[in-house]
Image (cartoon, rainbow, N blue to C red):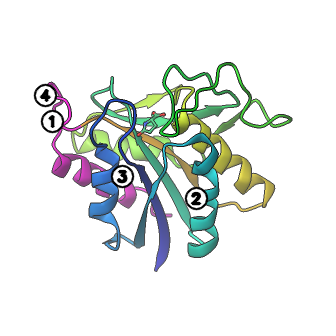
Amino acid sequence: MKKLLLTGFGPFHTHESNSTFEVTNLLDGTIIGPFEVTGVILPVVFEEVFPTLKESIEKNSPDVIVLTGMAWGRDEISLERIAINLIDSERKDNNGVQYTETKISENGENAFFSTLPLQKIKSTLDQLDIKVSFSNTAGTYVCNQIMYKCLEFLKSEDQKIPAGFIHLPPDKTLKSESSWDIQDLSKAMEELIKALKY
Ligand code: PCA
């Protein structure tokens, strides 16, 4: 059995909850396809997010890493292609910290591409009529930061495991215009995870 580390976030900004918190907790401990899923909730805090992820990677030694976060303004599953070396946040993090035009990694690469099989995920979800699209920006807040730090870390350790970031839309309880409830999002993530079989 392969090990898949799935992460989500809790509430942040003015959002009372986070769809990725619910989905990560629902899928934690389940078996999906060839994967045993471990779900971990990361803090929406610039200083703490990567140390928490690193600890989970070291504890679980995953074969695949799927990071997720909520994109308030989107109504489809977003397959993030790229993380850039920049924090420029309009909002404070959950510790009240805000950065403008700041590098994530002082001497690091400008960007890292997702190493998840995004084309395969897209065609699998398309066939199931699950709303999904590629995204060329994970933003400049905590989600982009953790995607960047995760990929930078794996590269520095020469760990060739697939890893990347998926933004989920908010569910109906958080945003009434959403076309998703938590069960739909959780089902979509299950199908996405099945598509990671290699
Ligand atoms: N979304 C934010 C951070 C936490 C979350 O769920 C983002 O897109 O950066």
Task: Assess disc 2: are there few (<14), some (14-19) or many (≥20) residues with their C-alpha within 10 Å of its C-alpha.
Answer: some
Task: Assess disc 1: are there few (<14), some (14-19) or many (≥20) residues with their C-alpha within 10 Å of its C-alpha.
Answer: some
Which residue position holds label 3? 192
- Give residue 15's position: percent from left, percent from top: 30, 34
Residue 172: which disc?
Answer: 1
Q: From the viewer's perspective, is residue 31 above or below residue 136?
A: below
Residue 131: which disc?
Answer: none
The local secondary structure at tag 3 comes to helix
Under mark 3, the amino acid is Leu
Question: Which range is magenta?
Answer: 171-198
Which residue occupies the extreme right position in the image?
107
Q: Residue at x 58, y 27 (%)?
A: 98
Q: Residue at x 40, y 69 (%)?
A: 37
Q: Residue at x 72, y 47 (%)?
A: 152
Under mark 4, the amino acid is Ser
Asked whether mark 4 lies closer than 8 Å to ligand 1, one says no
The Cα–Cα distance between marks 4 and 1, rounded to whole angstroms, is 5 Å
Residue 176: which disc?
Answer: 4
- Is there a contact, CB below 8 Å, between mark 4 and mark 1? yes
Under mark 2, the amino acid is Thr
Which residue position holds label 2? 52
- Give residue 97's position: percent from left, percent from top: 58, 32
The Cα–Cα distance between marks 2 and 1, rounded to whole angstroms, is 29 Å
The Cα–Cα distance between marks 3 and 1, rounded to whole angstroms, is 21 Å
Under mark 1, the amino acid is Lys
Q: Earlier in the sequence, mark 2 or mark 3?
A: 2
- Give residue 43's position: percent from left, percent from top: 49, 49
Q: Earlier in the sequence, mark 4 or mark 3?
A: 4
The local secondary structure at tag 4 comes to loop
